[in-house]
Every structure is written in structure tokens, then in C-alpha cells.
Image (cartoon, rainbow, N blue to C red):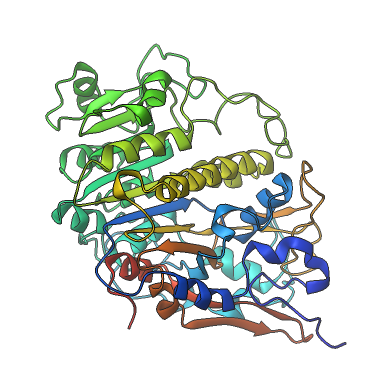
Amino acid sequence: MPPARRFKLFDSIPISRLGHLWRVLPVLGLLAAAAAAAPASGPRPKNVILMIADGSGASAIAATGMYTGKLGKQVFDGPNWAKTWVSTYPLRTDERPGAGAAQDPDAIYDAAKNWDTTPVATIRGRYPDRFAGYAWTKRTAPDSANTMSAMVNGHKSYNNAINVDGNAMPLTTFAERAHGEGKAVGVVTTVQISDATPAAGAGAHNVSRTNRTAIAGEMLNAGVVSVIMGTGNPDYDDDGALRVTPNYAWIGAGDWLALKAGTHRSGFKLIQDKAAFDALPETANPPPKLIGIAHAFNSTQFNRAGAAAAAEPPYAVARKPDVPSLRTMVEGALNILDGDTQGMFLVIEGGAVDRAEHANNMGRMIEEKIEFDDAVAAVSAYLDANTAGNNWSNTLVIVTADHDHLLLGPDSDTVPFQDLKNNGAGHMPGYKWQNNSHSNQLVPLFARGAGANLIAGCAKRTDAYTDAQGRRFGRGTYMDDTEIFAVMTGEGCH
């Protein structure tokens, strides 16, 4: 049987079945057009805004677009955005800090290994491998700590590493470079401030992401970051109820008590109430250093009570009214950081997209991705309005994910790498979780603004594979997550 005509950028989906799904990530020919529309290569951008939807691979984008009816119509789908794919493989999956700096060759992204449709003979457990490609992409999957670190320091490392190399030696981060150039640095997340992605993005260093209070201490005291917003509040649980006994899992007691007393040596002003977050975007003279810890412990919304089965549709349980949205936090952070005339580096994370995927909760994953997409729209509106002189000519915006999850179509037990089924706006798509953790698959990347043209020079690898049955798989041209650092620095890939 001759192979069906395939769209090389989106899994292995026949064009006849794609409908509007092709619009999620237009053909890479648009990359050249977007690059041509971007400013010419020149000085490093004044501002860099790096937006991470944690765990949000192609299927998370597709599922959200199907449910909202905005498939291919989001801000980052526009013609001025450069688009490509990114490999996120780890140095090694071994989490021991002292295991050396050698690259595990099996972990390197390989199209033939990833798309291998050879059936797996032995099927055990809740998430059987089914196909050799499923087994490989799960076995070699990276972690949020080392993938985010790779983006902001340009080097691969072991799973759980925060801005250290394979020998656990600290690496200079983009946040530190930006701060050294006089730029303001901020990090905003929907999860705990000292979790892996915000920690790495803010320039912290640690041999393990599990050393959370030490990481929070570095974020507060190293002098690199001016704005920190998220959760991990010791005094509140996931439903915004006051605890009898504080939980200092994410920020140490000394740091927290000093912040609450207004005596912290770092000079950070603490806000917690939603009203204070809501007022921040319009505050005329915001504090130069601010930490906002919402009335939530693990996440702003995902961990709220009332979750039904994993198939719970979006918003089946009312969202918490006492925490800020990601958009509000982003607008508040921009209002502080744009007071620095030298520029800014802002990391924005939709962290609970990943939490929902680990829980195999499609409905709450879609909720979290919608909230992240709204933050992308807020950043775009800020630049469209030339706010504080910041616009697309002097600002680079990158929207991507740190890694993928193996979310596939409803019949993907028998149809390898099957796409999701679009059941129309307002309806859950057809799907099947093939894992409750990460995968080593490529993730999408969207970029716009000053220096976005450098993406084309980095996306030089090709993802393509034809199996024994003549079925063609692959997503086309891609770059590596370490090369995001090269784009942000303005140095580009050579």
C-alpha cells in the first residue's frame, strides 16, 4: 500500500484527516518568511521574554485548540512568528551529580528511534510500551530542571540538574548575563517559585532540584532577580486555607519570616493577597524588587480540590477566586521590569500544564494551557502598544516547552503515533495517555521580534523516518534546546 501523503511537521497525520490541525504549526516554509519579516541581525535585543508552557508538546497545543475552537488561530500562529521544533534530550537520565560529563549516546534525539513502529512483544503495566518508539522516548526522557537549564546556559546536563554541568559545576546563565549588563530580571510561574523551571530560569544553581529551600534562598539573595511571582506559600494549602502549621518545603522559614516582617536583607517587598497582584499592573511607582507568593501551595489553580476522574472537562470545578491569573502576574512583572532603561529578561512559566499531564487530567491541562496562551496574548498586546518604548523591534519573545508528554490519539495502542481526534469546540478531543511522565519527543517553538531571524540558522537538523510499512513520520527541521541560549544572546548558531 503506498504511503499516505503526510504533513511533515505534525506527527504522522494524513493530510486528509487533519482538517484545521495543519494550522497549528504551519509548514516550515513560513519560517523563512517570518525570518524575513523580523529585524535584521544586529545587536542583542534590549529585552528577552522566554515563555515556557511546561510539558506542552504538539498534542497539548492541539488539544487546547480543538476544545477552544482556536486551532491554528492563537497569537503565536500569526505570520510574524518564526516556527520550528526543538530537541530536549538530556545529557543522561542518571540523576547522580558526580556521574561525569559524557553524553549518553542513546539519549540523543534520533528520528529512527523515536518513530520506531516495531511492536513490543512483552506488554506489562499501566502504560505498556506497545511500540519500540514509545519505549525509547519514555526511557530517555529529560526532566524540567535540565531542559530549562539547557535553554538558559547552553549546555546539556543530567536529569534534576539546575544550571550545573555533568560534573555538577555551576554554569553561567542568561539571567546572570542580563543582570551583569544592567538589565532587570524576573520570573513568573503558576507553580512554586523554587520549582525546577523558574529556578533554572532565574539563574539559580544546584546539583538537584530537590534542594528547594536552598534554591529559593539563592533566588532571593544572589542579587540577580528583581521580580519573583508564583506559589509555594508556607501559610496556605492548595485551596487557599490557612494552615495551622506552616509548610516550609519551598522557601525556608528564615527567608519567609523575614519577608513577612519586611526585614529581608535582599530588599524584596512581599505581596500575597490577590488584590495586591491585581493592582500591580497599574501601579505608577511599583517597588523595584517584589516577590509575590499567592495564597496557594503547589499551584495557583491545578491542585484545587474537587477533581473528578481524569476525564473531567475543563472548568467542571470552579477556579479559585483568591489567586491571580498568570496574565495578571505577567502584566505586573512587566510594569516593574520595564522601569529599567537597560532592558529586561523575563521568564514566564505555565507550570501546571505539566502537573495536569502527570495526572493524566486532560481537562485541567486544557485549563492551564488556556491560561498560558492568555499570557502570550498579554505580552503581545504590551509590545504592540509600544509600552515604555518596548516593542517588537527591540524585544525577542520565545514561546516553547521544556519537554513533551506522550499524549496520543484514542487508538494509539494499535495505530502508532496516532493524532488526537477533534470532536469540535467545547468538546473534549479523543485521546489516550501513553505515559504519566515525560517523553523525548520534539517540542514546538515560536519566536517573534528582534533576533527571531536567528532561529532559521539554528534549525538545521531534519526529523524524518519511513517505517517498514512505508508510513512516513517526522516533523521536519528542528534545533536543539541549548541553541535557544545562542538565539537569546544574539550570537546565533554556527
Image point 46% across, 21% down: which residue?
Answer: 237
- On the picture, is 58 further left or further right than 84? right
Is 399 located above or below residue 69 in the figure?
below
Q: Residue furthest top?
A: 244
Which of 341 and 10 lies nearest the eye of the viewer?
341
- On the picture, is 222 further left or further right than 428? left
Residue 380: x and y, percent? 46, 50
Q: Give the number of callouts.
A: 0
Residue 180: x and y, percent? 14, 55
Is 40 located above or below residue 200 in the figure?
below
Image point 67% across, 56% down: which residue?
Answer: 62
Which of 390 and 83 lies nearest the eye of the viewer?
390
Is 428 located above or below residue 19 in the figure?
above
Please identify the quadrant where the C terminus is shown. Answer: bottom left
Which image quadrant for residue 414? bottom right
Res 488 visible:
yes
Residue 462: x and y, percent? 54, 82
Which image quadrant for residue 247? top left
- On the picture, is 14 further left or further right than 473? right
Res 108 visible:
no
Which image quadrant for residue 281? top left
Which of 142 and 66 lies nearest the eye of the viewer?
66
Q: Residue furthest right?
A: 1
- On the picture, is 264 further left or further right than 385? left
Image point 35% across, 31% down: which residue?
Answer: 249
Residue 129: x and y, percent? 68, 64
Please identify the quadrant where the N terminus is shown. Answer: bottom right
Is 81 located above or below residue 175 in the figure?
below
Image point 28% across, 31% down: which residue?
Answer: 291
